[in-house]
Image (cartoon, rainbow, N blue to C red):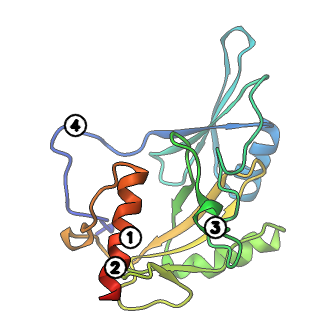
Amino acid sequence: MSFRLSEKKNIRFDIKGLSHVALVVSDMQRTVDFYHGVLGFPLIKTSELPDGGGQHFFFDMGDGQASLAFLWFPHASPNQPGVIVPKNNIGEVGSYDGADGFTTAIGSMNHLAFNVSADKIMIYKDKLESTGIYVSPVMYHYATETGVGDEPDETLWLTSIYFRDPDGIQLEFGAWSRQLTDQDVGHTPATSSTQWVAMMENRKVERAV
């Protein structure tokens, strides 16, 4: 039986899964060389946009269902670290500049994670590094106040490594550790930066008591 991340169902729409994510790149050939040549994703569809508008290429992500798409536009604006992509490689110890190091603009895609097996994380890290790609240390995600660390514990729910593509797009290989349940949903959704700052200040006061 295949692993299910959750037993919850969408009761409003019959969604089969992720169709594709489309990202903008500066050089389609370089993108093919990386995603097919380095990461091994099969290139399954190419097309040109009307009126010389650019190109749209699709790669299979490995399950025969979801795909990863890229758009190339002749006059696209350049990449902007800290706006479109994080300034720093997520998971890069000591490089964050605080939260600013991995913050991106509203509407941006902060990072893209690919689902892998936990026992392949170190193997894939070594494989990527053998091609000259910088890969973050392994990051363990906990269901605790600290959130992350460099050693697994009993609350572990995700293990990750982070790296970038040639355009600086933040990528992740992530391995789920267990099925998620109602116990994993316990935070109040943020509505504004003002509300968030107040909530963080209240939390500091509660800890000090």
Q: Position of residue 184 (x, y in %)?
A: 27, 71
Q: Are marks 1 and 2 in contact (CB under 8 Å)?
A: yes
Give the foreground label among 3 and 2: 2
Relative side of 180 to 171, left or right: left
Choose the circle earlier in sequence order: 1 or 3: 3
Q: Are marks 1 and 3 in contact (CB under 8 Å)?
A: no
Residue at position x 47%, y 89% from top? Answer: 152
Secondary structure found at label 4: loop
Query: What distance separates the C-alpha of mark 2 from that of mark 4?
Result: 43 Å
Q: Which residue is mark 2?
A: 205
Q: Which residue is mark 3?
A: 162
Q: Which residue is mark 4?
A: 13
Q: Nearer the viewer, residue 59 or 30?
A: 30
Query: What distance separates the C-alpha of mark 3 from that of mark 2?
Result: 34 Å
Query: What distance separates the C-alpha of mark 1 from that of mark 2?
Result: 6 Å
Choose the circle earlier in sequence order: 4 or 3: 4
Secondary structure found at label 2: helix
Q: Which mark is residue 22?
A: none
> Which amino acid, by three-letter code, is at mark 2?
Val
Relative side of 124 to 209, left or right: right
Q: Please say if 28 is above or below 40.
A: above
Q: Which residue is mark 1?
A: 201
Secondary structure found at label 3: strand
Q: Looking at this rendering, what residue extends furthest in the top direction?
A: 51
Residue 22: image quadrant is top right
Q: Please say if 86 is above or below 175.
A: above
